[in-house]
Image: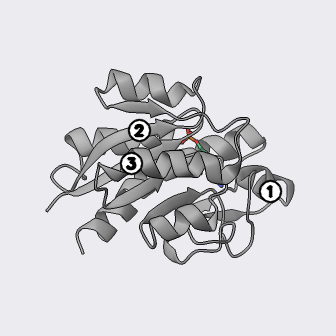
Amino acid sequence: MKKKIAILLSGRGSNMESIVRNVQNGILKNICEVALVLSNKEDAYGLTIANEFGVQTKVIISKGKKRTEFEQEVIKFLKSYNLDYIVLAGFMRILSPLFVRAYKNKIINIHPADTAQFQGVGGYEWAFKNKLETTKITVHYVDEGVDTGGIIAQKEVDLRGTDTLEEVEKLGLKVEHEFYSEALLNLFKK
Ligand code: GAR
């Protein structure tokens, strides 16, 4: 049975794009289907990309709402989809226990650092400022903490030879784009 997923994002959507490409014509074909892409920001560029790929989109604005109010709206909206997993791809909101409990062990995130070493926003800045020779991209379950959920898979990125934050980001994102789909494939085919 194909896994049914929703992808949640807040911005650029490059990870969402690589997952959708893999679902339509790559390693995730016949493994999962993207029921929709949901954004908490109406101007997220990822929405434009999702539309171009023919994926249904939905905006539920979070700004100006209490965290639980926003999440209740999302939960209510998603209910009829009967999703197997929620895949976060640059979704820049911390999810409260309300949401995490509604989708226990079903929310997956990609983090641009080793979650054991760095949590929160700015994983590449952290690696760059600390002059790390390598960093680890982490795909993990979302639990009630910030980037504390169980690790599903990690991939090391060799940062030697990079001189600027932009170079670090470019290198890291390239790895993210392949690695997220690989990690989802391994999880979904179990
Ligand atoms: C990615 O680098 C992702 O790992 C990061 O945001 C970027 C989103 O890019 N996520 C986090 O920092 C979560 N803590 P994208 O919108 O182009 O996929």
Is residue 156 visible to us here?
no
Which residue is pictured at 59% across the width and 23% down the height? 43
Q: Is residue 138 left or right of residue 169?
A: left
Which residue is pictured at 72% across the width and 51% down the height? 124
Q: Amino acid at mark 3?
A: Leu
Q: Are marks 1 and 2 in contact (CB under 8 Å)?
A: no
Q: Amino acid at mark 2?
A: Val
Q: How much space separates mark 1 and mark 2, taking CA atoms?
A: 29 Å
Secondary element under disc 2, as helix, strand or loop, is strand
Identify residue for label 2. 37
In the image, residue 44 sits, relative to residue 137, either above or below, namely above
Q: Amino acid at mark 1?
A: Trp
Image quadrant in which you'd find residue 96: bottom right
Q: Earlier in the sequence, mark 1 or mark 3?
A: 3
Image quadrant in which you'd find residue 148: bottom right
Identify residue for label 1. 126
Pick the quarter of the image with the N terminus. Answer: bottom left
* Image spot of residue 125 (x, y percent): 79, 50
Mark drawn on residue 67: none
Is residue 101 visible to us here?
yes
